[in-house]
Image: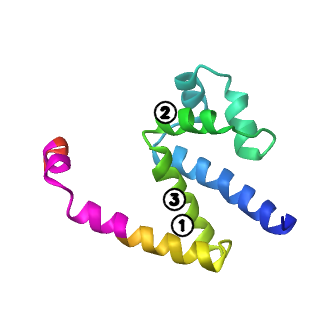
Amino acid sequence: MNNELYIKRWKFFREVLKIERKHHKITQKRLAMMLGIEQSFISKTETGDRRLDIIELLEYCDAMGLTLTEFVFRMEGRLLAEGCLSPARKEEFLRWQSIYWEYYKNPPASKKKQEGI
């Protein structure tokens, strides 16, 4: 594994966590309270002193009102913008991005009813 690329991706992962938390107007203290953990856990995660496993990431996303899929989509968008996706992954991301946007422009009737559209 390319260590330089790994370090960049790890940095962007932490940045996306922090950006999403702030976007949802949630403080570290509030997020920690929602998760039933210490505020220092959130701080250490955002600074890179602590890592999240997939279940912790799922709970983190739930607390911010995001699905894991939405988080990964945003993460990959950031990696694409920073040139940190392989050409094959970039192509696949762009394909899924067009599908994603088309779905939200024209959701199925069941989703329209759910969201009151």
**Image height of 86 relative to 43, above or below:** below
Q: Is residue 52 left or right of residue 18?
A: right
Between discs 1 and 2, the one toward the N terminus: 2
Are the two marked residues, 2 and 3, in contact with CB atoms closer than 8 angstroms? no
The amino acid on which the numbered mark 1 sits, given as a three-letter code, is Gly
Q: How crowded is mark 2: few (under 14 residues within 10 Å), some or many (20 or more)?
A: some
Are the two marked residues, 3 and 1, in contact with CB atoms closer than 8 angstroms? yes
Residue 10, horizontal then vertical, whole percent: 74, 56
Q: Residue at x 57, y 59 (%)?
A: 75
Q: Residue furthest top?
A: 36
Q: Nearer the viewer, residue 17 or 39?
A: 17
Q: Residue at x 27, y 60 (%)?
A: 104
Between discs 2 and 3, the one toward the N terminus: 2
Question: In terms of secondary structure, where does tag 1 sit?
Answer: helix
**Image height of 99 relative to 38, above or below:** below
User: Circle 1 is placed at which residue position?
Assistant: 77
Q: Which circle marks residue 63 in the picture?
A: 2
Q: Which circle marks residue 108 in the picture?
A: none
User: Circle 3 is placed at which residue position?
Assistant: 74
